[in-house]
């Protein structure tokens, strides 16, 4: 069994290969401020970034600020976000979240994990997206790709997203956390595909101890 030091050493090699494969990757959710990214991230649950990006231009023209969204009519909001799926829960959370931001934070999206995760519909994943891409705070966003591939790579055995995050924080250098999120998402879409992984084509194969059961 690998020691923590050995995992860290192997992780550095994985990071170097990911940097070669996916240089300059970034958040694919289109946004211009913290409010837009927060709403887009909530909409992205069980939905593709591509679909969210199709919905948000009209959405943010109709509701350009946190205060506009806080005052939104839920039925009308649903007409804008229906195609993202789970629109009942998403509409409820988005409006409630924006109301809390107005009431408790003066309309400014919080810049710390505790305050962000106190908002309706905002868990660690969404909070970490905001911290990463708006406030430049290093954080590991664990979505299905990041969790699954990190298990395949033998960097965690955990299935709970928060536990995966904590394991990775012990292994990965902090300056690589933001890139790790995006690189694994790209890798999961192109090579380490959930139902049909292309292990024979994977440049990480020499560094991968083998897939773990999900």
Image: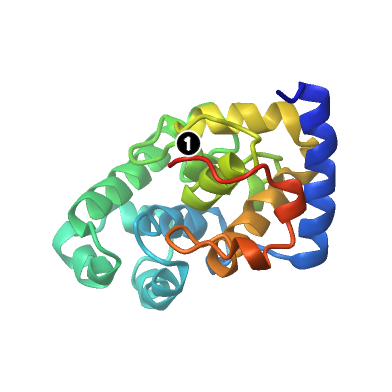
Report whether residue 108 is seen.
Answer: no
**Where is residue 151 drawn, in percent x and y?**
57, 40
Q: Residue at x 35, y 43 (%)?
A: 97
Image quarter (top left, top right, bottom left or bottom right) of the N terminus: top right
Horizontally, is 119 left or right of 90 in the view? right
Vertical placement of residue 166 versus 77, above or below: above
Q: Residue at x 78, y 40 (%)?
A: 11
**Where is residue 89 drawn, in percent x and y?**
22, 49
Q: Which residue is mark 1?
A: 105
Q: Dot 1: within a 10 Å radius of its alpha carbon, few (fewer than 14), some, or many (20 or more) residues?
A: few
Vertical placement of residue 191 versus 150, above or below: below
Q: Residue at x 28, y 46 (%)?
A: 93
Q: Quadrant of residue 52?
A: bottom left
Looking at the image, which residue sits at the far left?
75
Horizontally, is 114 left or right of 133 in the view? left
Q: Residue at x 25, y 58 (%)?
A: 72
Image quarter (top left, top right, bottom left or bottom right) of the C terminus: top left
Report whether residue 50 is seen.
Answer: yes
**Where is residue 4 drawn, in percent x and y?**
76, 23
**Where is residue 10 drawn, in percent x and y?**
81, 39
Horizontally, is 147 left or right of 19 in the view? left
């Amino acid at each position: 069994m690998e020691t923590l030091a050995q995992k860290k050493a192997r992780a550095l090699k994985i990071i170097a290969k990911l940097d070669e494969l996916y240089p300059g990757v970034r958040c694919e959710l289109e946004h211009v401020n913290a409010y837009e990214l927060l709403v887009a991230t909530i909409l992205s649950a069980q939905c593709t970034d591509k679909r969210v990006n199709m919905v948000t231009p009209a959405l943010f023209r109709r509701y350009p600020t946190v205060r506009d969204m806080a005052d939104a009519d839920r039925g009308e909001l649903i007409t804008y976000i229906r195609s993202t799926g789970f629109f009942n829960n998403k509409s409820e959370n988005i409006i409630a979240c924006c109301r809390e931001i107005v009431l408790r934070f003066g309309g400014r999206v919080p810049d710390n994990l505790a305050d962000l995760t106190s908002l309706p519909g905002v868990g660690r994943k969404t909070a970490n997206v905001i911290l990463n891409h708006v406030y430049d705070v290093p954080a590991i966003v664990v979505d299905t790709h990041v969790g699954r591939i990190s298990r395949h790579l033998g960097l965690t055995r955990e299935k709970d997203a928060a536990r995966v995050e904590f394991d990775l924080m012990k292994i990965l250098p902090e300056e690589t956390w933001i890139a790790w999120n995006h690189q694994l998402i790209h890798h999961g879409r192109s090579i380490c595909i959930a139902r049909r992984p292309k292990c024979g084509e994977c440049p990480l194969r020499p560094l991968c101890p083998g897939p773990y059961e999900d």
